[in-house]
Image: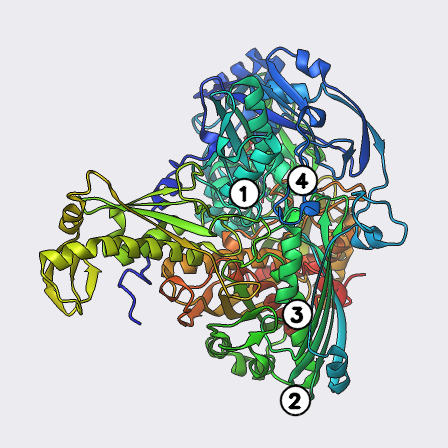
Amino acid sequence: MKNPAIIGQSIPRLDAPSKVTGKAIYTDDMKLPGMLYGKLLRSPLAHARIKRIDVSKAKALPGVKDVIVGADTPGVKYGNWRLVPQSQDELPLAVDKVRFVGDEVAAVCALDPETAEKALGLIEVEYEELPAILSVEEATAEGAGLIHQESKGNVSLVRKIDYGDLDQMFAKADYVREDTFRVHPVQHAYMEPCSSLAQTEEGNRVTLWTSTQTPYIVQCLLASTLGLPENNVRVMKVQIGGGFGGKMELRPWEFCAAFMSLRTGRPVKFTLTRHDELAYGRRRHPMTIYSKVGFKKDGMLLAKDFQVMLDGGAYNAMGPTATFLCGTFGNMLYNYPAYRYFGRHVYTNKPPASAMRGFGAPQAAFAAETQMNMAAEELGIDPIDIRLMNAMQTGDVIPDVATISSCGFKESLEEVRRISGWDQKRKNKTPGKGLGIGCFSFISGGVFNWFNTKYNFSAAEVKVFEDGTAQLAVMACDIGQGPDTVLRQILAAELGIPIHKIRLISMDTACTPKADLGTWGSRVTLMNGNAIIEAAGKIKAMLRPVMFSELDLNQIHDLAFEDERVFVRANPKKGMDFAECVYKALRGREGEPLTARGYYTPRNKGLVSPAFSFGAQVAEVAVDQDTGQIQVEKMYTAHDCGVAINKMSVEGQLEGAIQMGLGYALMEDLVMDDQGRTLNTTFLDYKMPAAEDMPPGESVEIETYEPEGPFGAKEAGEGLAIPTAPAISHAVFEAVGYRCMETPITPEKVLRALGKIK
Amino acid sequence: MMMPHFTVHQPDSLEEALDLLGRHRSSVKVFCGGTDLLIKMRSGALSPDHLVSLTRVKGLRTISYAESDGLVIGGAARLAEVGKNAEVKKLYPALAHACSVMATVQIRNMGTVAGNLANAAPSGDTLAPLLAYGASLVAVERGGRRQIKLTDFFTGPGLNVLEPLEIIEAIRVPDPPPRCGSAYMRLSARSKVDIAAVGVAGFMNLDLDGKVIRCRLALASVAPTPVRCPEAEAMLEGQKPDDTLLAQAGAACVRACRPIDDVRATASYRRAMVQALAQRVLAKCYAQAAGGEA
Ligand SMILES: Cc1cc2nc3c(=O)[nH]c(=O)nc-3n(C[C@H](O)[C@H](O)[C@H](O)COP(=O)(O)OP(=O)(O)OC[C@H]3O[C@@H](n4cnc5c(N)ncnc54)[C@H](O)[C@@H]3O)c2cc1C
């Protein structure tokens, strides 16, 4: 099928000029008349009972307008898995107990931030300290204290996948290996620290401007925790400076801003600092991953037993979904006749881990891809050959999970082999240099509905006007990843009008169509794109009668919408301007505008996702054997994201993903002491790759056409963040023989492995 | 934290700057690029009511070189300017290198060498090269001027012998003799855009027979102040170095450092890196000196 010309174009982001010139408005830039500044008091202890809180001195401080503690709130627990109420384990402010250093205990709002800060210091909290449980091993040990009384042995959720005859397949295997991997926590480090501003109207209605990826989820959970009807809560955004999974739940400051605004009748704003984010914010799950895998001599995979403990921190957050997806990505890339997954989400007294770009997959892939490389080495098979032999293909079925409707994995492997010079470079090895490979697959949105929405997963409303312009309203949110541009490209392609003639209204729960589950799981382009196509189709259907009657067309004629014209496809001269056509269609409708809605909910698509992306990446590194320093010299990527709707946007995702993968592999780490306090809470000590650290890259897009995607598109947002760490790790092994089983890969670990330091 | 209110003064002359410092003596700081100072003010660690900026003081930004005087770096000369200066690049490559790889482009465009010294962070990147070159600085206050050898300047992390109302007017670096070589190497544990976890600077000068007349080695980030390596320097002076001796001297540098474990690197890694870098620095200095390069 031939796509309209605007599909696949590199159109610069429409929001880019305002962002790069500093003109874009973010929540913290907003000030409303009479606005109060909120601050949170957080627990200094990892685990303690609250015996007494006295806020009287804070309340008495001039300038302080309100102080609240858990007991002042309705005390309704929340969490994104509404379908499983016992998983909803969080309260906006702690009641009785604190469970991590940073757990929110009280909130203050005052006329200025300094007064609010001062008031925090006047709140007296008496704690009875409890033993802090800081690792999954301690948490699951016999007789360990319970962080949540309701949990069984501190395990909040178990996920199992089991198909094929595991024992029989392992018995058939010529080669079996067992390994344990440990992966560390990293943070999203989005540029915009969280900020929320609430305003009350008519007594009990609240508008919340907030830096979120999931406006609908925030609306629902905020309403339930405040005890208000859902419709009394309106969630909106201005610009959002990144999320990467860290802004997809209701957060305490969102509740506190709304609740205190209702109490004081004044707007209330909370903005976190970078210290707050690094010390107490959400992070990627550290995991302990045991993997046993069996092969035939020739490299054919037979079975895998994958057992994972996720270090979830003090609350579930998005941990249950990460537990689910980690299992899915333990076997996603290759055909396993038998596979068993046993994932446990474990509570510890640490800041909660949650979704982060890849959502359980980067960890699973680090273990699975590393193990694949270890097996290839021992079986004497080229790592790319062993993958080609077992690779997933279009039409393959993962029992009880999914059918792969498009798959460019083998092509990706072959292309990356070619562009990286894999074969020649492996033949002529230079000491201290190496090539390594890592692969990925990822979902294009989830099929699951643990949030239990009654609405469609995605919706779009299109209006067209007699001046030839259109308006698109969607609840989907652009948090920096680009849908404000890409979604307009999709509508422009459908209606045949230029992108700048489409006004976009996005993410306002009061006036964009219900609903959208938000920006996560790489779902927006596919799901919202499909909803837009459906809405545009309805608009076109409204315009058909005009064309047929005005031009006296035959029943067999087909219409085309291109270049701001509507015309007979077989006879392009026969047609009229789009604007004229809309004008004619509007006549006689008694002023009723031309509006249509479209929806999308994946159906009959298995348990996981309507479509999967695939890809392979090769890292080329040089290791300095005296200093252990690792220089990533080049990254080669070949990937299948279906049809790329905006090539520039896909390239941006790839570059950003490499930056994050590089940080995950080599630099970033949240370091904690034995009291559960995070030690590196500034960007001086939490090291992310900077521009100078970025390696050059080369990439190839393997174009497949995904039947379930808009114009054949699949995801390109998260999957690319998966392969970089295992590829670099493999390259380091090839360069100096150090195999990283416990991330990150640091110069010290390299030197220790080389016996150069003790 | 919000920054408290303060007044910035921008005098045109040194006299005026010194007067302003005197007038507001109870709560005043000298201010150059502000890349250290403003961060401390934002965090609440410092809260001076007055800042006396040196950026407009005439003549204070000059970088001049003459064979008789050596290099004179003005108290307000910026890191990037020093790093790009043709004479510095040719005659003082260790300093030029430090000034062009430290921090970030933006910080190098604002920050100054004097600020780097006055800030006295053990990780300061210009400190080790200037120590290796045997630099000194000229400090001025209303009472007069004094010259301070850099070896006597640092007293602890963030501490030095400057009086509160003293201004670093210039940094003086001796003219390099013939047959000398110098180098600075730094490692950060992770990103390239990072403060140094270990820095090593060296200077070596040979006689006509190829024997070491003088060697100075200085280490950054591995002790409460930057340190020299007297043992390693003594091993080399008077000797005609070969690979073994250079390696031994590099190893001896480890004994001059007192590193700590922190979130950036462990002490044992830092010690190993002092040795690795010192050996490379010495090899480079020697090759330059023997090759007749500056
Ligand atoms: C992002 C970032 C990265 C950085 N990276 C590095 C790095 O890699 N390596 C490194 O060494 N440093 C680094 N720094 C620290 C800083 O940039 C340097 O120390 C810089 O040289 C300071 O110079 P300044 O002119 O900005 O000093 P200011 O901030 O203006 O002053 C610093 C101190 O020196 C005093 N002072 C300044 N000038 C004089 C003078 N002429 N006489 C007397 N006292 C004076 C001030 O009173 C103040 O106490 C970094 C800073 C930032 C923000």
What is the CA distance from the residue labelled 4 to the residue labelled 3? 30 Å
Residue ID at (75%, 83%): A168
Residue ID at (77%, 47%): A348
Q: Position of residue A248 (x, y in %)?
A: 56, 45
Instruction: Give the mark nearest the N terminus, 2 or 4.
Output: 4
The residue wearing badge 4 is A279
What is the CA distance from the residue labelled 1 to the residue labelled 2? 49 Å
The residue wearing badge 2 is A298
Q: Assess disc 4: are there few (<14), some (14-19) or many (≥20) residues with their C-alpha within 10 Å of its C-alpha.
A: many
Q: Is residue B62 visible?
A: yes
Q: Is residue B65 visible?
A: no
Q: Secondary structure at mark 3?
A: helix
Q: Secondary structure at mark 4?
A: helix
Instruction: Give the mark nearest the N terminus, 3 or 1.
Output: 1
Count the numbered circles shown: 4
Which mark is nearer the camera, 3 or 1? 1
Residue flagged by tag 1: what amino acid is it? Ile
Which mark is nearer the camera, 4 or 3? 3
Chain letter behind tag 1 = A
| Residue placed most toward the observer, A269 or B262 | A269
| Residue placed most toward the observer, A460 or A137 | A460
* Quadrant of residue A17 within the rendered picture: top left
* Quadrant of residue A660 within the rendered picture: bottom right
What is the CA distance from the residue labelled 2 to the residue labelled 4? 49 Å
Residue flagged by tag 2: what amino acid is it? Asp
Q: Position of residue A459 (x, y in %)?
A: 41, 50
Q: Secondary structure at mark 2?
A: loop
The residue wearing badge 3 is A368
